[in-house]
Image (cartoon, grey):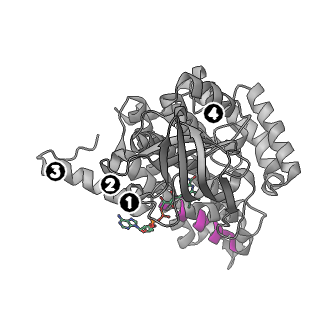
Amino acid sequence: MTITDLRPTSEIIERRARYRAFMEEHVYPNELALGREDVEADALIAGLRAHAREQGLWAPHLPPEAGGSSGSFLTYAHLNEEIGRSVWAQLVFGCQAPDAGNGEILWHFGTDEQKERWLKPLVAGEVRSFFSMTEPEVSGSDPTTLQTQAVRDGEEWVIDGHKWFSSGAEGASFGIVMAVTDPEADPHRRASQIIVPADTSGVEIVRATPTMGHRGRGWTTHCEVRYTGVRVPVENTLGDVGDGFRIAQKRLGPGRIHHVMRWLGQMQRAFELMCSYALERESFGGPLAEKQTVQNWVADSAAEIQACRLMTLDAAQKIDQGDEARVEVSLIKFFAARVLHDVIDRAVQVHGARGLTDETPLAGMLAMARGARIYDGPDEVHRMVVARRILKSFAAGEPWRFE
Ligand SMILES: Cc1cc2nc3c(=O)[nH]c(=O)nc-3n(C[C@H](O)[C@H](O)[C@H](O)COP(=O)(O)OP(=O)(O)OC[C@H]3O[C@@H](n4cnc5c(N)ncnc54)[C@H](O)[C@@H]3O)c2cc1C
């Protein structure tokens, strides 16, 4: 593999240009209205989604046979350099977290009946879903300690437990719930993933937990959810009983790289705003662009963004080739989360007080960026995964090769 292999083909360049045109015409001008998260914003989103679908820009994370328009990770990475630039765009193009990750596992592990009942309306954008794994009482970094249980009673599971940070659960039609189905099994065979319709008796959305001062609405909520005697048929199990961790790995790997792809768009947008403003704003007799500190921020940001791009494209290509790319995905997850934060933070600083206002998207981007170092595994856990795997390879007499 060479760096040239990671460059976009002419077909990707053409597709990317179509996303850019759509973003410029329909998404950026509506960002403030969408950010109000009210009934008008809902109507606006619905209209934009219909328009995106008509233009063949719908669900670029899934292959056409699953109802999407792409399916290659490398292509999706390139497209996200446009889509990722606005938090709302993922919703507009039908590739929003956590539905994108849920769609992928339903596509890979769902039975024909599950695909028909849950995947089809999800990909069509008719319903939303949530992924319910993290619990307030135990460390989300170590999900072998999960306490939510599903006990089999005849042909039903009876689920009892307490979750939080089930993103988007408010207004969703169903959740994929990670629950212990065999407490005696090997730690990584204890849990299963079970599809739970949100209107099942015993499912209670306790609250949308405000984060960084933002309660959210619908898709943007992070919900605390209680499951009390929740009964669902055993055929709602994804994969085999005990496959929960195997499927979570399958979900979280791509889910993580999807996040990083979106961050590439966020970083580049912040970088462009920083450079433009540095050239325009004058202080102490000249533009900010002439101050060395600002120049250092521009240079450091350019180097770091390009490193993130190449690492992401490399990991995406390896996944396309059938590799799980565990090290590459963990590397980019913690590295890019830090770069994302730093680039946006520098851009805010260059804008001075204006950087904290709604006159630019930077303040909202900065607030969202903080979570990146925690969700889908905190930085420290990804560093641990990377170091353990590399050292294991050395211990086995196989030096780690940078390929
Ligand atoms: C915006 C957002 C959205 C989310 N959406 C979802 C969702 O949709 N569904 C879902 O199930 N969960 C979701 N989560 C939860 C997320 O996956 C967990 O927060 C994450 O896995 C960490 O778990 P925790 O919060 O329990 O932290 P803990 O596991 O308690 O860890 C706390 C801190 O301890 C440190 N730490 C942990 N382990 C180690 C280690 N081995 N070495 C060194 N330090 C360590 C880290 O600094 C970590 O931040 C979301 C979180 C956020 C912030």
Mark 4: which amino acid? Arg
Q: What is the residue that sits farthest to the bottom in this orientation? A: 284
Camera-nearest label, 3 or 1: 1
Q: CA distance from mark 4 to mark 1?
A: 34 Å
Q: Say whether disc 4 or disc 1 marks the residue closer to the N-terminus.
A: 4
Q: Nearer the viewer, residue 166 or 250?
A: 166
**In the image, what residue type sits under mark 3?**
Phe
Percent x, y for residue 315?
A: 41, 40
Label 1 beta carbon within 8 A of ligand 1: yes
Which residue, as the protein is rendered here, is positioned at the far right?
Answer: 40
Amino acid residing under circle 1: Val
Q: Earlier in the sequence, mark 2 or mark 3?
A: 2
Q: Which residue is mark 3?
A: 394
Helix, strand or loop for disc 4 = helix
* Discs 4/2, front: 2
Q: Are marks 2 and 3 in contact (CB under 8 Å)?
A: no
Please state if 317 lies on the left or on the right of 37 as rendered: left
As drawn, the label of residue 385 is 2
Which numbered dot is residue 16? 4
Marks 2 and 1 sit apart, C-alpha to C-alpha, by 6 Å
Element assignment for label 1? helix
The residues bearing labels 3 and 4 have C-alpha atoms spaced at a distance of: 41 Å
Distance from label 3 to label 1 (Cα)? 20 Å
Q: Which residue is mark 1?
A: 381
How crowded pointer 3 is (Cα within 10 Å; few <14, some 14-19, many 20+) is rated as few
Q: How many circles with numbers are drawn on the protein?
A: 4
Q: Tell me which residue sits at (78%, 56%) in the image.
A: 35
Say if the magenta span includes residue 44.
no
Q: Which residues are magenta?
A: 338-352
Q: Secondary structure at mark 2?
A: helix
Contact? badges 2 and 1 (CB < 8 Å): yes
Q: Is residue 235 visible?
A: yes
